[in-house]
Amino acid sequence: MKNKLLYLSLIAVSLLTACDRNLDIVNPNQLTAQSFWKTDADALAGVNAVYSTMHRGGISRWMLFYYIIRSDEGRSQSPATDIVNNMDQFLITDYNYGNAVAVWNDNYIGVNRANQVIDNVPNIPMDATLRNRYIGEAKFLRAMYYYHLVTLWGNVPLILQTSVVGDKPASATMAQVWAQIEKDLTEAAAVLPTTYSGADVGRATKGAAYALLAKAYMQQQKYTESLTPLQWLVEGEGKTVYALVPNYRDNFLITTENNRESVFEWQFQINTAEYTDDDSQTPNQNYGTSIAQFFGPSGIGWSDGEAQRWPTREFYDKTTTGARDPRLAASFLFDSTNVKGPDSTIIYGQTFTQRYGRDNKRVWFRKFQNDHWKNEEGYRSPNNWRYIRYADVLLMYAEALNATGKTTQAYPYVDQVRQRAGLPTLTMARPGLTQTQFLAQLKHERVTELSGEGHRWNDLARWGDLGPQLASRDPAFSTFVKGKSELLPIPQLDRDLNPNLTQNPNY
């Protein structure tokens, strides 16, 4: 899918970005929104442009800081104090902080591109099944972008038609945004295919729509509702599509992308001509992600984001053969990525001791780095971001079953995840847990399985665990203010232009 998505979207990306601008003079030689949407090829290019939003720097780099570094599993020791204050320590004084504005803008660019597909593709004469699929893909992606907006900002404008200059949409309630996400994903799941082949592998599927729908329900504590999409994935047709791959590390290598465990992943690729995070500067579009450069270990990347040390201590369960949990080495680069210690741990071609000495206690996230095929990082990582894995689905299903009073029935799905890591099943290791005890165990299981994958912030929010009490393992939470820090401030630039936007509480 990478090549097809990237190259067929070149014209459409420029068009769908430019159409937001208010031009005084119309260039008769330039495509307009009115003249573009004519053929099925136009429809495909338009849909590809919605996917291409994921290549932009605000989403593929800075948004992950907010979901990972702002949570208790990450931290920043960046020399850029604005990153530390705004993205780690809850010390937000600039409501126009550029990295936050980039995340806000990029998600709304994605929303507007999706809206254009949904508005225009129904009028194109083409195969009805393909038309419905394209609209379904756009609805899935619009829901995904709104999922980001509602979990980061809360009460955001709900824009469901192509934007025009002068629009001043009011803030919607979180309930309204969630309802639209549910609607989009339900409609998308009804028309999206179960699988793709060839160049289309990686596009949104029925399973991806159901998985994100389950996430949306669960963030609202609608656990009963979440069971239906999760059951399709785990017990229904999805069971024949998805499975845990035998080697956990294969989920994060460029050689094993889009495997059976992948429910949805963001497609990245190297473009050596790229010189910008923008995805509308043809032919110099950014097709990759720079998160590996910004999360890379000191001396390799900028190390603006890194891991806390406490998650490495969560991997205390031994395998059935008495070995260390293999997910630890796959998840983190630190003095003991190799169980033998810093003299045997290799960090991009050198031992940990050679690079940092034996006593350095810093920890870096490893999963989306490129140390498995080169000894440096850069701004053009081709390593796909695994947005939703089947292991996450299994743990969500276990959580939903437990939350609805079916704790005994939840055990087998945690067992699958633990068995893949070589650990004893939970059924054998900790039988008879109460509902409360089982949830506590699930919190541990999600750390060991999903660290550094962007789920931790929403997990903490869903469980009601965000608060100053987390300062015992992440000192940044000492400045967390309940009733404020759960959400980011609405950018003041947008509020200046649109008086209908309401600022979030206590900002």
Image (tube, rainbow, N blue to C red):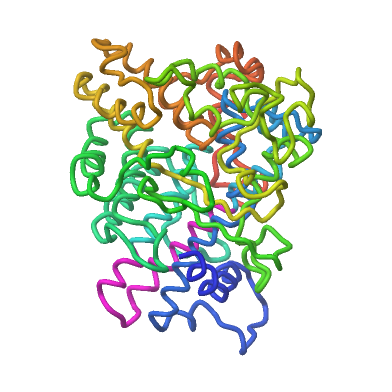
Magenta residues, as a range?
106-135
Q: Is residue 357 visible?
A: yes
Image point (51%, 63%), residue name: 163
Say left or right for 382 vs 241: right
Which is the main secondary structure of the residues drawn in magenta? helix
Seen in the picture, residue 450 relative to 436 is either above or below; the reply is below
Q: Residue at point 66% right, 16% down?
A: 475
- Residue 54 point in image, percent of width and height: 54, 55
Residue 302, by quadrant, is: top right
Does the rendering let one see residue 399? Answer: no
Tell me residue 360's x, y (percent). Answer: 75, 21
Q: Quadrant of the N terminus?
A: bottom left
**Residue 111 belongs to magenta span:** yes
Quarter of the C terminus within the rendering: top right
Q: How many marks?
A: 0
Looking at the image, which is closer to me, 177 or 304?
304
Residue at horizontal 37%, vertical 36%?
A: 391
Q: Is residue 300 left or right of residue 136?
A: right
Q: In front: 323, or 249? A: 323
Determine which quarter of the picture holds residue 484. Answer: top right
**Farthest bottom residue in view:** 28
Residue 84 colored in magenta in the image: no
